[in-house]
Image: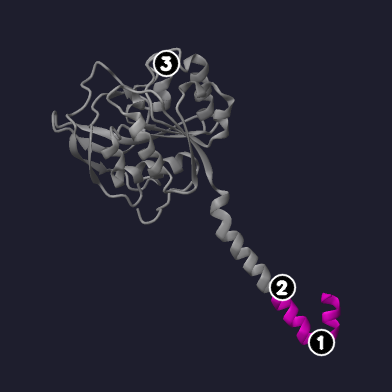
Amino acid sequence: MLARFARRSPLSCFGSALLIATWCQAAGTLAAEQAPAQTAKPVLLLTGEDYPGHKWKETTPVLRSQLEKDTRLQIQVVEDLKFLRSPDLHKFAAIVMHFKNYDPAVPGPEGQENLARFVREGGGAVLVHFACGAFQEWPEFVNIAGRVWDPKLRGHDPYGVFRVDIIESNHPITRGLASFEVPDEMYTCLTGETPVTVLATAVSKVDQKTYPMAFTLTYGKGRIFHSPLGHDVKALGTSAVGKLFRRATAWAAGLQPMEVGGK
């Protein structure tokens, strides 16, 4: 049909070429607009057990809602720590750890090694609040978490509002973020010598010392973000905290952190 059209007149041929070029441009624009959907990443939000004072059944929906403001993050919640033993763990781009286990057998060595392999091979990890206290029976965990809970240290300042200072503004997670205030527990109980990049800190009102509130590290090929923020619904519902964890999860999953809805 195009050949017959071309025989009729050079002008018609030019018009057809222009039509084809316009169609190709439109198709390219549509593909570009659809590209973000192709970069969506499956993210596991693992929970189901914690210290009794940490109401994970209340905080998990809030955390999920904060993360899903970035529509590229496809969040799946699992409330069984034994899932860490599953080969299905490796279907995810990142894991958000919102738990603290108490039974050394759950998930046990099988689950621990599977988690370590997941991160070593490029899976991202985000640790929320008391995830620092998980796996007390597993020495290797400090190399994944960067810092871990030491029960011999003072746990945290009394619950209340404190200021979190962004001290590394060039990292993809914190670029453009301002320091903020949050009602939370300010943890003073983390220990470890694993090299980390500290992104945010806070000063204790009890001992006037400075403590890390957000930091990153790598384990093998995996990106890790760890923050002891997020004690309760108020803390996780704070816009700045939600933004911090949302941008961190995108980064851990291999995405460029982005603003969503101006929030």
* Residue ID for mark 1: 9
Residue at point 31% right, 39% down? 236
Residue ID for mark 2: 20
Percent of width and height locating residue 182: 23, 41
Asked if residue 180 is positioned above or below residue 107 in the image, the reply reads below
C-alpha separation, residue under disc 3 versus residue under disc 1: 79 Å
Q: Is residue 109 above or below residue 8?
A: above
Write the start and end of the magenta stretch as one range. 1-20
Q: Quadrant of residue 152?
A: top left
Q: Residue at x 34, y 43 (%)?
A: 242
Q: Residue at x 35, y 29 (%)?
A: 56
Q: Left or right of 82: which side holds 239?
A: left
Are discs 2 and 3 less than 8 Å apart at CB? no
Q: Is residue 11 left or right of residue 219?
A: right
Which mark lies nearer to you, 2 or 3? 2
Q: Please tell me the numbered disc located at residue 138.
A: 3
Q: First in sequence: mark 2 or mark 3?
A: 2
Which secondary structure lies at badge 1? loop
Q: Residues within 10 Å of mark 1 (few under 14, many from 20)?
A: few
Of label 1 and label 2, which has the lower sequence position?
Answer: 1
Q: Is residue 73 visible?
A: yes
Identify which amino acid the numbered label 1 is placed on.
Ser
